[in-house]
Image (tube, grey):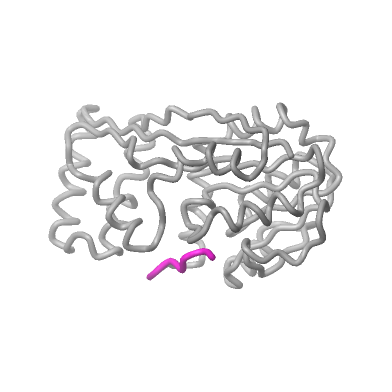
Amino acid sequence: MIKELNNVDWGPKIHEQFVRQAKWTKSFRNQIYRQVGLNKARKILEIGCGTGVITAELREKTDAKIVAIDHDEKMINEAKRNVQGVEFLVADAADLSMNDKTFDFVVSQYLFLWLSDPKVALNEMVRVCKKRGYVIALAEPDYGGWLEYPEYELGASHIESLKKEGADPFIGRKIQTLFEAAGLDTQISIIAQVWDKHNLVNNIEEEWERVLEAGIISQEDFIAKVKLEKKTIEKNQRMIFMPVFTAFGKK
């Protein structure tokens, strides 16, 4: 149900990318945790745990039993090295082995954009969630809302590369409809994520590397784009904005 990523280094590089992504939305996750009463949880399921970045955060915030799954065994092995006190399983979000009404919270981050059939996976998440429990999408991007200036076509290149990998770059705007259709009483919010100069300096080359690895641009174009970006960023004349949606639905 989750599309395979091509040409990905499953070691420290991908973990560092997940850490950076998590930092951008940390304050909003903390707000959601407070709203849903995560500290009262007895059992939590995380879907698409990757290398365990969000798993580690959940482990720090609660004494609940945590089960974390990912479809990729390499990801799970990395997560096991990064987080203790969690049950990690290789599993498919669309075919969970857990019994009905098992978990107080079913949590994911940057998951739905990678699902080939998000409705099927969400129905499974709702099935294993207890009555009056919560299904939570901590962050889902919408590249259709990407704004940049000057226009160097980074956003358009990301959309093209994500489509090429089988992802849905416009999943953010769809998340409320998906949750409500699954029978969840849903609240959404939008994170106005504007990249400041610090984030641009630290991340812009990697952003173009992702486009390069997807085969969207040539090595020569990559070198030219990065050079242009760094020159513009140094002058503090570069702006990038992308909306990130969060949602939590009560069963």
- Residue for point 64% across, 69% down: 77
With respect to residue 81, does 119 lie above or below?
A: above
Say if the magenta span includes residue 2: yes
- Which quadrant does the C terminus fall into? top right
The percent coordinates of residue 188 (x first, y second) are: 56, 30
Determine the image quadrant of residue 82: bottom right
Quick check: 99 left or right of 115?
Answer: right
Q: Nearer the viewer, residue 101 or 45?
A: 101
With respect to residue 39, does 10 lie above or below?
A: below
- Residue for point 43% across, 27% down: 192
Quick check: 157 left or right of 73?
Answer: left
The percent coordinates of residue 193 (x first, y second) are: 42, 31
The percent coordinates of residue 17 (x first, y second) are: 47, 52
Magenta segment's dominant SS is loop
Q: Nearer the viewer, residue 236 or 43?
A: 43
With respect to residue 129, does 3 lie above or below?
A: below
With respect to residue 127, does 5 lie above or below?
A: below
Magenta range is 1-7
Say if the magenta span includes residue 122: no
